[in-house]
Structures are given as structure tokens and as C-alpha cells.
Image (tube, helix red, strand yellow):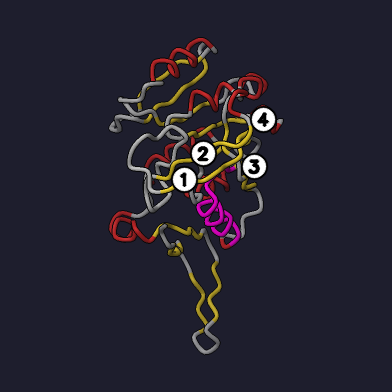
Amino acid sequence: MSSFFILQKNDIVDNADDQVIVLKNNTYLLPSSNLSYYMSHGLFESTLILWCVQFCNKNSVFLDIGAHTGTYSISLSKYCKQVYAFEPQKKTFYALCGSVALSNIDNIECINYGLGSKDQIGNSTLKIVSIDGGGSSMHATSGIIKEETIKVRTLDSFNIDGISLIKIDVEDNELFALMGGIKTIIRSNYPHIFFECNIESENKKKLFDFLDEINYNIVSITPTTNMFLAYKKN
């Protein structure tokens, strides 16, 4: 599996004599396999991360479901009261925790669980399909590098309130994760849901129908073809 490198944004104070480096700003542990992209373009989805700022505020909670190593969580944490970052894959979760610790951020809680429906509660098999930890899925049927046992809970079981934004990228388990969080969604007065859904997904129609049934409109986010925003109907 992939090793990681550190991307440190803004200032670094370096005492060369003692070989001490103090990290002063946001620090991201990122997969080395994507180093050339990060060097040329910066963070993946940086424009989308900035776009999400409008849905955050200092009195509300941001849920990062499928947090990977924390680019969304860390970048948006200063705009929120609290961030809950869910990442089930073990090595990726450790990188997420490292990113948060090195960034010295105290309002992010990292949670080593996958989220799903009531029927998915318990142990599940996560299929890992890339060395950078991206794309791992409970539903993958091809390109599987290895498998890992993860623990799955419902979002409702965490009793989180005051949410203004849910970002969810869980590789075709979005429908089931939201089904397991319906009480939380209602209790938070239908927060914005920013989600990925590939065109070829077998669950796309079911996911869109579910969101419609629970009082959401859906718009696509251009110029992407697989990113969407669900917002409360008037």
C-alpha cells in the first residue's frame, strides 16, 4: 500500500542547527503515489473544498463521511464549530489522525467506522482497489488489491446535532449511509448534502429517489459529472 508525504501549507519555521521543524499551519499527510499531481496542482478538489465554505459556519457541525486523509476536514475545520471525520480503512485513518495532529486542530474528531444502514451494522469487508486508499468500497467487484474487515455503524447511533453540511464519498454506499442517518438529518433540519455518485452506479436512481422522498432537491455541480448537492425543498 501507499506510503505518505507531508504537504505543509504556508510558513514553516526551520532551525537548521538543531534539525527542528515546527509546523505552524495546516499539514496534510497525502499518498506518495499522487505526489506528482499535488506538486503540479495542489490539493485534489481544492476548488470544491473552497466552494463548500459557504455551507459552514462557526456555530455548526460538518460531517466528512469518507474523509480519506482529511483534506476536506482540515481545510474546512476553521469555518465550523466541530468536524466529525469518518474513515474506516485502517492505514488511511492513521494518516487522517496524523494530519489532524500535525495541524494542531482540536475541533476534528476522527472516527474509525464506516457508516451504513441498520442492515449493515457490524463487521463488513472493505475492498481496497488503489494504493492511495481512494475508491475503497464495500461494493467493489473488480480491481481488488486486498480486503480489510471494517466496523460499520449508523450515523444515527452517534447522536450528532447541529449539522449544516454533510460531505459523503463512500463509493456506492451513499444511499445506505444516509438511510442510517435519517433521524440525524431531520433533527439538523435537513443540512446540505454534498455527495459523489458515478453515472454508472446501480444505486444512483435509488439514491436520488430516496433524497427526493425525504424532502431534498438535487443539483449537479459543474463542471464535474459525478458531484451533486442536495438541499432542502422549500
Q: Earlier in the sequence, mark 1 or mark 3?
A: 3
Q: Which amino acid is tagged 3?
A: Gln
Q: Earlier in the sequence, mark 2 or mark 3?
A: 3
Q: Which amino acid is tagged 2?
A: Thr
Q: Earlier in the sequence, mark 2 or mark 1?
A: 2
Give the mark toward the camera: 2 or 3: 2
**Which residues make up the magenta segment?**
85-101
Q: Earlier in the sequence, mark 3 or mark 4?
A: 3
Percent x, y for residue 81? 65, 41
10 Å neighbourhood of mark 4: few (<14), some, or many (≥20)? some
In the rendered image of this protein, does residue 41 appear above or below residue 84?
Answer: below
Q: CA distance from mark 2 to mark 1?
A: 6 Å
Q: Residue 162 has which mark?
A: 4
Left or right: 42 as drawn, with respect to 77: left
Q: Nearer the viewer, residue 13 or 33?
A: 33
Q: CA distance from mark 3 to mark 4?
A: 9 Å
Q: Residue 147 has which mark?
A: 1
| Residue at 60%, 37% in the rendered image | 123
| Residue at 62%, 44% in the rendered image | 111
Whether the magenta-drawn stretch holds residue 94 is answered as: yes
Q: Secondary structure at mark 3?
A: strand
10 Å neighbourhood of mark 3: few (<14), some, or many (≥20)? many
Q: CA distance from mark 2 to mark 3?
A: 29 Å
Q: Label 4 near label 3: C-beta < 8 Å?
A: no
Q: CA distance from mark 1 to mark 4?
A: 35 Å
Residue 87 seen in the current view: no
Q: Look at mark 3 in the image and give the residue it sits on.
A: 82
